[in-house]
Image: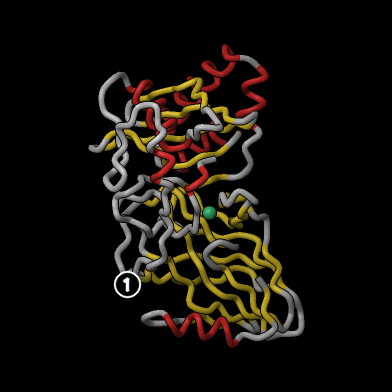
Amino acid sequence: MRLTSIFLALALAASSAIAHDIQVGDLEIIHPAIPLPPPSAPTAAGYMAIANNGTHPDRLIGVEVPIAKSSSLHRTEVSADGVARMLPLEAADIPADDTVLFEQGAMHVMLMGLSAPLHEGDMVPATLIFQHAGRVEVEFMVDPADGMDHGTMDHGAMDHSAMGHAQADGPMSVMGGTDAEQIEALLKAQFERPEAPLTVAPITVQGSVAVAGWSQDGNGGRAFLRKDDHGWFVELCSGESLVLPATFQSMGLGHAEANRLAASVNGAETSAGADLIARLNAFEGTVIIGRQGMGDHGHGHNEDKAHGH
Ligand SMILES: [Cu+2]
């Protein structure tokens, strides 16, 4: 989003507990901040405003955040059905005499695979890489979890779940059965709608992580799941990235573990056929799901999960 005035950006920054900013040449990086993610969240989003007070345009072409296994520029796009998905962003133009906002539901810095939990008030070192200004060292301040309600789950839809194990206000979990059965039941409970049955296949389980292909209404995608004390939960949905070892590594898996999972997913899908693979690959971008109903609404992404995929 571009504003002709930097005043809004300054006002936004000033509304945070403590604002900070970094001035480099004509560029001003205003309050780089990460809203506190839920305790065990493997991902976080960074926001800021970048003001260009000069007469030459610049471009943000990269970001490095050492505490994350991978960090990248993302944009969030909300489709007509209300699903917010994140797409990689190659670069962000910073026009002359303008201010560009990185904010919730729009452009942001995506951190995946946090190596340590964040705490309010932490300063997270990062490097922004500009085409002209070069490398700029900044610190993202960990702000209080924002109070917006991100986890608006359509509890009504869950009543139609095949299994009916999900509790409307408790943690969504499905107990009993094999891992694959639990995963299928969970995905159906979370995303199936009466008018849109969900098919879950293939399901590849490796210890406490899993990848499940799903098809619904002629569309498809892959879900990455994790198992914790409360059972399985969907961490995110994506397309072709969920067959790549690099993706699994960015989500915290070790090198060997990531390769093994990628090989298993590829093997399972190959036997399922090329049509299915094409459908699973067609899912664009990444939708962060996360555990529902745990009282954490601080995922940093304004996603509407009400409509499933
Ligand atoms: Cu993102």
What residue do we see at 76% from left, 79% from top? Answer: 56
Is 251 drawn above or below residue 278 in the view shown? Answer: below
What residue do we see at 29% from left, 48% from top? Answer: 169
Horizontal and vertical percent position of residue 49: 56, 75
Horizontal and vertical percent position of residue 218: 65, 29
Which residue in the rendered view is the most extreme toward the left? 229
Q: Quadrant of residue 181?
A: top left
Is 205 drawn above or below residue 64 in the view shown? Answer: above
Q: Is residue 131 visible?
A: no
Q: How crowded is the residue under tag 1: few (<14 C-alpha within 10 Å), some, or many (20+)?
A: some
Count of marks placed on residues: 1
Does residue 138 appear left or right of residue 98 in this picture? left
Does residue 42 appear left or right of residue 23 in this picture? left
Which residue in the rendered view is the most extreme toward the right? 56
Horizontal and vertical percent position of residue 271: 57, 12
**Disc 1 secondary structure class:** loop
The residue to which callout 1 is attached is 121
Toward the viewer: 91 or 211?
Answer: 211
